Image (cartoon, helix red, strand yellow):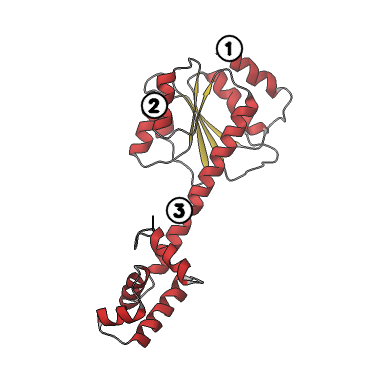
Amino acid sequence: MGGIRNLLLGTLENRAVTSQNGDPAGTADDDAMVLIVDDDAMLRAGLGNLFRSVGMQAVLFGSAAELLEYSLPDVPCCLVLDVRLRGPSGLDLQTRLAQMGVHIPIIFMTGYGDIAMTVTAMKAGAEDFMAKPFRDQDLLDAVSAAIEKDRLRRRGLRKVEEIRGNYATLTPREAEVMGMAVSGLLNKQIAGEIGISEVTVKIHRGQAMRKMKARTFADLVLMAQQIGLCKAEQ
């Protein structure tokens, strides 16, 4: 434990100094945030300073309970979590977050090199598992990769919500035609199924593509897959 504390605090002497309120003088990633949970106050502060010194926002917690009481911001995040905490452990917190539907990339820290614990954490979806003492650059690299992964996940969720919003603007008939078309039916088959002309099917299909903002029919099929209207081909 002392080794990693000394490594972190020693490294910080050569890094930029943050302002009094804890915000860096110029951030490299203003919208992202690192959440740190460790019951060692000195190590926790050292980690916070490390991340802030390279332009990352950091919020510190001394226990799992403190994090659970915190209102998570709507920004890309990464959780740096000590496995062994007073009270509920890091693994307990990982389980609780999963039960709550909170999907934050987690990087575990441990000073014990517990292989069984590592396997459990990774199987439950941990992003990385770092044994103390570790190089500060290794931790920074792992956190940067985790934040980028969370950023892409959130971007994907926003895209799906946009698709759902566009789908909600379709008329019942347009939605019906779209659903049948993306399922593989030809215009002629759709016309026969619902009792309208093939020309009318084409009109509804064109309207659906316009409202869904699909440039091609392949785009429309992909959108339908993303919102669960049809399954992707294996």
Residue 158: percent from left, percent from top? 47, 56
Mark 3, secondary structure of its residue: helix
Which residue in the structure is indicated by mark 1? 2
The quadrant the C terminus occupies is bottom left
Compared across the picture, whether 31 is left or right of 213 comes to right
Residue closest to the eye, 42 or 205:
205
Q: Report crowding for label 2: few under 14, some 14 to 19, many 20 or more residues within 10 A (C-alpha).
A: few
**What amino acid is at disc 1?**
Gly
Q: Which residue is at a point 42% across and 66% down the rendered structure image?
A: 221
Image quarter of residue 50? top right
Image spot of residue 23 (x, y percent): 64, 36
Sequence-wise, the earlier of marks 2 and 1 is 1
The amino acid type, in three-letter code, at marker 3 is Leu
Q: Nearer the viewer, mark 3 or mark 1?
A: 3
In front of the other: 216 or 61: 216
* Residue 60, placed above or below residue 229: above
Q: Mark 2 against mark 1, which lies toward the viewer?
A: 2
Q: CA distance from mark 3 to mark 1?
A: 41 Å
Q: Is residue 147 above or below residue 233?
A: above
Q: Which mark is residue 157?
A: 3
Residue 223 placement (x, y as % from top left)? 43, 63
Q: How dense is the environment of label 1, judged by Cα within 10 Å: few (below 14), some, or many (20 and up)?
A: few
Dot 3 or dot 1: first in sequence order is: 1
Residue under circle 2? 120
